[in-house]
Amino acid sequence: MSDFVLFTDSCCDIPQSILDEWNVRCIQLSFCYDHQAVEYRNCDVTADEFYKKLQEYGFAKTSAINAYTYETTFEEVLKEGRDLMYIGFSSGLSSSSVTAQSVAADLKEKYPERKIKAIDSLCGCGGQGLLVYLADEKRRAGASIDETAEYVLSMRQHIDHWFTLDTLTYLRRGGRISASAAVLANVLDIHPMIHVDETGRLVNTAKIRTRARSVKTLLDRYMEHAKDPEKGKFIICQGACREDALKLDDMIFEKCGNRAMHITDIGPVMGTHGGPGNLAIFFITEGRNQP
């Protein structure tokens, strides 16, 4: 394995136990519940606790990683005489990656002998996690930090993201849709199909009637766009809807004999806006197509 430290952040929604297996360090984003002043790190609460309290308090607010956190975290590694790479949450959804790149540029002046790579993944949730996995795989194969960075940049547009939501209530509370649109969608049992585009932003691509059909649509998107449906790596993430996640995994297995490499919880950042019932799949594709 090449000797550089690989970082990501908690928006990858990969449990720390798995990141430890990949030898990846994780920087935590934070959040607070509505009407509370207490700020929590992503790792301070379990997913079950988060979604229970989210329903109780009605809304939560998330915070990007600040420059001081990046600087102190990165500098610990640089002082050890080691190079580092950070693969961060999409700049289309958070300012974290932009802050990390600014800090990296400043630290490069202070440690000119070290290589510091801060990469905007243009991904989030399990898509970011899948990109981090590929980076670690490349590193384990003996690639240098420069080679790994080049590979990550070449692959980030080949990680497909598809989400469906059980309710639009949380998008309404976050100000992303109108109250009337959310009420109408909930009455008509409409479930949006959300995609992450080339700029790393969320795009609503379809409105699906009934939850069962929206889960089936995730299967359809996988079969249509996965580069290798039978053997390719994919990750399923879920927010308080594990039965649906297992069902989707079973549907893919029945269709093409493949299983998710991981089924993980959607954490507070994505969970704040999607709410409970947020189900997503991430896989390698030829390109981020948006039908």
Image (spheres, rainbow, N blue to C red):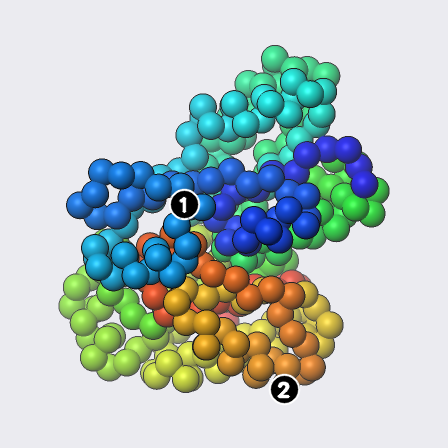
Front position among marks 2 and 1: 1
Instruction: List the single residue furthest toward the bottom.
Output: 254
Q: How many marks?
A: 2
**Can see residue 81?**
yes
Dot 1 lies on which element? helix
Q: Which mark is residue 132?
A: none
**Can see residue 156?**
no
Residue 278: x, y in percent? 40, 66
Of the image marks 2 and 1, the number of the one nearer the N terminus: 1
Q: Which mark is residue 44?
A: 1
Instruction: List the single residue furthest toward the right.
Output: 142
Residue 44: x, y in percent? 41, 45
Label 2 sits on residue:
254
Q: Residue at x 66, y 31 (%)?
A: 84
Q: Amino acid at mark 2?
A: Glu
Dot 2 lies on which element? helix
